[in-house]
């Protein structure tokens, strides 16, 4: 992977897997490495964003990383003017998204930017609750605007009533107008996504820097413990499942739910029982809004919501019913986490030598706790409440094409970039308007070829990083969310292909030591394989995986930092966890006994 100079593979020397030649046609020119920018690009450090995009990108789904590329970066560079960061660059390599953090090291430039940053961040921190409440209302309004959009099929003729009313703007105007509004709506939620998120990470980073200066031996997860135990919206869907499990036991309808067999089978069997209609009514009440919850990260259309596939939450409810019948508790150990949080905070506070230091500590821990809920709650409003509905709206657009035979299937729309949809839409509308042959055959051939290429791209194993090893990594999202630090880069350099490692190092995400059999999974469809007492090993977890944390012994992930979801949930459940191991799913096999040391950030394979 690395050469003698300490670099990763040059991104310009990456070759496509067999059968994927010409893969570049799936993506816009600006997302590719190019000779025009070679001098800069091959001297940057790039890492694979497997947290959000673990598969080769569908062209339409590029709307998400491209939004991050522009909106996160403009928030960092032009809106807040973060002193040490210039945002995160994005490129596509063999269909996979690679990103590059851009840092500022010149002290004069940092000082200049800090003068801009201070009053901007200060305004947000001083008015956090008011601005956050406004943010929630804006997010809800954006979701409602999305839901108001409609994409009816093109009619054979415009209705007579429309003609008699003099409505000169017909179906084609409505189609393209609604599509414009759809893209605008995606941009709106993108701006909301990043409006306050960087400040949330920034407040935590500032608190962490203070602690590391005052207490040189303090561990990162100890710092994280001091802001744990705060109720956040991301746990509410899981709480709804627990309530439904409890009611199922009370009403005597748990049997069919435990038995499973798909949503239709389960609900029919429950509905036939005496207490079934009452339980189904409670299920329906929970579905809005709590089941608009993606089974994955929510950043691609492949992550359906619970509402799209009720079999997923029903399986989780079934596992909770089994726990209740065994006499086990379902609640998170919130009181225990809070008690430990307060104890740790008080002990470190007392170690500070002066009243001034203690006051600074108090202010920083209060700020970190105040902004912490947003760091997680923004996911609920953006990726879950909004994006799950968004993907279904895009499917409605695809259905307009499929209804005229322009596409073979509504799902074919994912193989067109959002800007290409305009071209195909114009082609469709021109053929409809003039009653002459359109170029649908061209698009069907192109989509078929793109399907073939994307399947070939799935055979490639993306390296964790490309390009030049950076001098230091200080960009807050890179360190806090992805867990990519200077130590991470060095581990990647020395790990070879990452297979058959007996010891893996990562981010010490949640304290404690545990041993148990490993359960390696790669998608939410495998969650029903996880058994009580196992150590979950996965590329990354999603918020909708929270129920599984009530039965596992510990967690290990390939990617993620101290504020990744797996780290946060593990701390809230009091489970040892190591995230950002890089190669956990490559080195560990299901059934192997492993030791997870969440205090030191080490995972050890104990047997063959």
Image: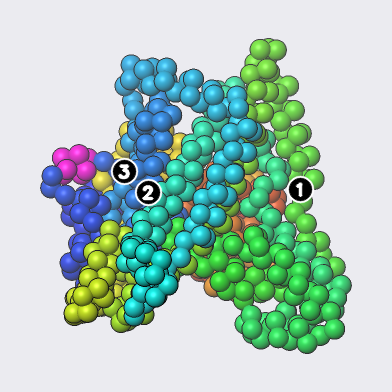
Labels 2 & 3 near each other (Cβ < 8 A): no
Vertical arrangement, residue 376 with respect to residue 547, above or below: above
Q: Mark 2 or mark 1, which is nearer the start of the sequence?
A: 2
Residue 423 at x, y percent in the picture? 23, 64
Does the image show residue 207? no
Q: Which residue bears the numbered disc 3?
A: 89
Secondary structure under tag 3 reads: strand
In the drawing, does residue 605 fall left or right of residue 232?
left
Q: Residue at x 71, y 30 (%)?
A: 345
Q: Which residue bears the numbered disc 1?
A: 334
Q: Is residue 40 magenta?
A: yes
Of residues 559 and 55, the one nearer the viewer is: 55
Q: Mark 3 or mark 2, which is nearer the start of the sequence?
A: 2
- Which circle, 2 or 3, is nearer the viewer? 2
Residue 336 at x, y percent in the picture? 78, 45
Of residues 223 and 273, the one nearer the viewer is: 273
Range of magenta residues: 37-43
Vertical arrangement, residue 343 with respect to residue 593, above or below: above
Q: CA distance from mark 1 to mark 3?
A: 39 Å
Extreme-front residue of the structure: 164
Q: Is residue 154 magenta?
A: no
Does the image show residue 210? yes
Q: Quadrant of residue 351?
A: top right
Magenta stretch secondary structure, dominant: helix
Q: Which residue bears the numbered disc 2?
A: 67
């Amino acid at each position: 992977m690395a050469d003698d100079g300490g670099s990763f593979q040059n991104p310009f020397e990456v070759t496509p897997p067999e059968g994927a030649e010409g893969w570049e046609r799936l993506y816009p020119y600006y997302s590719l490495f190019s000779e025009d920018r070679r001098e800069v690009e091959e001297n940057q450090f790039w890492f694979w964003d497997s947290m959000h995009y673990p598969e080769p990108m569908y062209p339409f789904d590029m709307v998400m990383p491209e939004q991050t590329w522009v909106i996160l970066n403009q928030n960092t560079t032009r809106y807040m003017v973060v002193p040490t960061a210039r945002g995160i660059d994005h490129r596509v390599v063999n269909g996979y998204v690679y990103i590059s953090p851009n840092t500022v090291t010149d002290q004069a430039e940092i000082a200049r930017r800090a003068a801009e940053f201070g009053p901007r961040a200060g305004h947000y921190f001083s008015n956090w609750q008011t601005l956050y409440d406004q943010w929630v209302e804006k997010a809800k309004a954006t979701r409602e605007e999305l839901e108001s959009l409609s994409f009816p099929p093109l009619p054979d003729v415009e209705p007579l009533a429309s003609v008699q009313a003099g409505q000169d703007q017909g179906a084609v105007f409505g189609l393209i107008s609604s599509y414009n509004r759809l893209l605008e709506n995606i941009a709106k939620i993108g701006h909301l996504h990043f409006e306050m998120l960087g400040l949330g990470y920034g407040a935590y980073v500032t608190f962490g820097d203070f602690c590391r200066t005052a207490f040189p031996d303090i561990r990162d997860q100890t710092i994280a413990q001091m802001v744990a135990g705060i109720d956040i919206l991301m746990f509410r869907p899981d709480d709804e499942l627990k309530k439904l499990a409890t009611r199922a036991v009370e009403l005597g309808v748990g049997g069919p739910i435990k038995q499973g067999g798909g949503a239709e089978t389960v609900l029919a069997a429950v509905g036939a029982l005496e207490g079934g209609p009452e339980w189904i009514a409670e299920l329906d009440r929970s579905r809005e809004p709590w089941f608009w919850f993606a089974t994955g990260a929510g950043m691609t259309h492949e992550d359906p919501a619970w509402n799209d596939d009720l079999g997923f939450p029903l399986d989780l409810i079934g596992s909770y019913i089994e726990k209740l019948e065994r006499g086990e508790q379902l609640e998170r150990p919130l009181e225990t986490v809070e008690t430990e949080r307060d104890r740790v905070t008080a002990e470190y506070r007392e170690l500070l030598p002066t009243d001034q230091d203690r006051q600074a500590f108090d202010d920083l821990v209060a700020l970190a706790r105040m902004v912490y809920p947003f760091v997680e709650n923004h996911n609920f409003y953006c990726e879950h409440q909004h994006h799950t509905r968004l993907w279904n709206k895009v499917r409605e657009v695809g259905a307009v094409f499929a209804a005229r035979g322009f596409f073979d299937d509504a799902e074919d729309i994912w193989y067109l970039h959002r800007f290409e949809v305009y071209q195909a839409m114009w082609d469709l509308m021109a053929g409809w308007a003039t009653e002459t042959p359109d170029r649908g055959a061209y698009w069907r051939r192109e989509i078929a070829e793109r399907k073939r290429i994307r399947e070939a791209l799935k055979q490639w194993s993306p390296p964790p990083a490309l390009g030049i090893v950076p001098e230091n990594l200080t960009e807050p999202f890179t360190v806090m969310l992805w867990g990519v630090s200077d130590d991470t880069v060095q581990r990647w350099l020395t790990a070879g292909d990452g297979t058959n490692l007996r010891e893996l190092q990562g981010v010490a995400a949640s304290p404690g030591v545990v041993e148990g059999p490993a359960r390696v999974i790669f998608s939410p469809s495998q969650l029903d394989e996880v058994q009580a007492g196992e150590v979950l090993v996965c590329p990354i977890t999603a918020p909708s995986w929270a129920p599984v944390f009530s039965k596992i012994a510990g967690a290990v992930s390939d990617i993620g930092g101290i504020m990744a979801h797996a780290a946060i949930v593990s701390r809230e459940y009091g489970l040892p966890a190591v995230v950002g191991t890089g190669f956990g799913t490559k080195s560990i096999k299901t059934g192997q006994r492993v030791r997870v040391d969440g205090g030191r950030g080490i995972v050890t394979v104990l047997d063959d």
